[in-house]
Image (cartoon, helix red, strand yellow):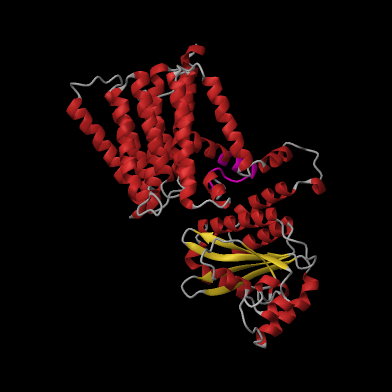
Amino acid sequence: MPLLGGIAVAFATLFSIVSFYVIYKQETTWPIDFSKLCILSFSGLIILALGFVDDVKGVGPWGKFVIQTLAAFIIWAFGIRLNFFADYIESNIFINLFSLFFTLFWMLSFTNAINLIDGLDGLATGISSISFLSLGIISYTDNNNQALSFVCIALAGATLGFLRYNFNPAKIFLGDTGSLFLGFMLGGISLLGAMKTATISSVTIPIILIGLPAIDTSFSIIRRLLKKTSIFQGDKEHIHHKLLEMGFSHRRVVIILYCLSVFFAFLALYLTFNSGRQTGLVVLLFSFISYLAFNKLGYKEYLKLLKYRFSVNEEEDNVPLEVKFFDLTAKLNIARKPEAIWETASKIIDTIGFERSSLHFFDPEERKISKVFSWAQDLDKIESLMKRYQKIVMGKSLGKGGSIVSYQLSQKNPKILLVRSKEEMKGIICDEILKNIAANEFVSVPIIGRNGQLGAIVADKYFTSKPIKQEEVAMLSSLAAQIAVIIERNQLTKNLNTVFANVAKRQQNVEAQKNLLY
């Protein structure tokens, strides 16, 4: 199975560790207790099993959380723990409580950070390779720890070997099996290294080392809390998604993020060789890079949402567009039925600034478009337009050309956002539609699922003929991506045509939605 490549990485690593111990146990000094490596490996197998079940059958977010917490608790119970604050607390009870809390937080953060970054071919694998190689160098030079260094090199070797088949276009994938295992092992090994010196810098170095996943995970948690959605709920606003939206190719995005990971690795090595004296400077630089990412990748809009969340005197008329948008998308996230999805989606489209819109789905095998939902700001004004559309269709006077959505589907790159005017679409779109139905300018945004295009959203400003702004297209694109996630999360893709065909039948008696606008 292509999603289970993580099993090969895990067992290659464990085989290397056992072989190394058997061959060199009498010749090599082991500054750490080998039993701790066994405990870490055992807990890693629990995480591996969790990922396997998740890839094959699926595991709910709380199920993942409980099992990950159990695996982290096991290593804490056997002495693999954070204790850098022990010198500042006298009570053993509080020391153990703090140690348990920070150890669990540490392990769950590392485990899920690698899992969250695993969104493009080769991304998580390459970043893990860089992290393990760097951690291996740090372990050997800083603590002269041959055993820990070898474990890191074994993991780096396994991931580098796997990367050959996982880089774009990938033949096999890590899946949750591999990404969760790699994240857990990275967290556990960094804990073993931190236990040797128990200083602030020993804790800071691993965080700097996984700087990219750490930043991405932090942004994800903050973003979901501000949007009032579950922190376990996936979205398409990760750093790699943002870079793709900026126009970079899949491979270029991965290479850019590799380079950033190498830079973070150099920062961690610099901090190691300077004995922690430059910790403040490195942390400041790390924070500056996080700030740049926050600004340049479009996350700064969340600051407006944060300001509004803490304001108690905001008037409804003064609520920023971004806040309205995020509040409505939070409601959209809990929608389950197609009607509820479109009801909230149409409010979002209205909030963005469009004046009418339609939602389309199609059968990829038959290349047949299914008309589903339509919406307009002023249904009274559009009634005559709808009647005119019916006459065009019933009279079969479409003439040369097709619809806007059929043009969208004809594109070689289905992910392209189409902002077009009447003039440039002459000869491509039906003349009657352009003359009687279409606005001066319209946009078609594809709805892309895991396995390809599910459909499209078409929107325009028919009543006022105002130009479509770039930020409006970006927000509509974000909405389309969210709709795709919701459809797949609720497993509507399995019977998409049947589900939406039934919806269309139920809407036949609704005057406002007799036909699509396009």
Quadrant of the image containing the N terminus? bottom left
Residue 487 or residue 416, whichever sits in front: 416
Q: Is residue 398 left or right of residue 15?
A: right
Residue found 51% across the figure and 56% down from its top: 489
Residue found 64% across the figure and 50% down from its top: 330
Expressed as whole percent of the image width and height from the top left, the position of residue 181 reads: 37, 40
Expressed as whole percent of the image width and height from the top left, the position of residue 279 reads: 52, 20
Residue 99 or residue 317, whichever sits in front: 317
Direction front: furthest residue: 424
Q: Is residue 296 left or right of residue 144?
A: right
Q: Tell me how many marks there are.
A: 0
Q: In this picture, which residue range is highlighted in magenta? A: 220-234
* Residue 284 position by quadrant: top right
Expressed as whole percent of the image width and height from the top left, the position of residue 135 reads: 38, 29
Residue found 55% across the figure and 42% down from its top: 231
Against 170, residue 192 (above or below) is above
Against 139, residue 92 (above or below) is above
Confirm whether residue 240 shows in the render.
yes
Is 325 one of the magenta-colored residues?
no
Residue 392 or residue 285, whichever sits in front: 285
Q: Is residue 242 left or right of residue 185?
A: right
Against 60, residue 516 (above or below) is below
Confirm whether residue 80 shows in the render.
no
Quadrant of the image containing the C terminus? bottom right
* Residue 43 position by quadrant: top left
Expressed as whole percent of the image width and height from the top left, the position of residue 54 reads: 40, 49
Residue found 65% across the figure and 66% down from its top: 458
Against 354, residue 389 (above or below) is below
Direction bottom: furthest residue: 395
Residue 203 or residue 51, whichever sits in front: 203
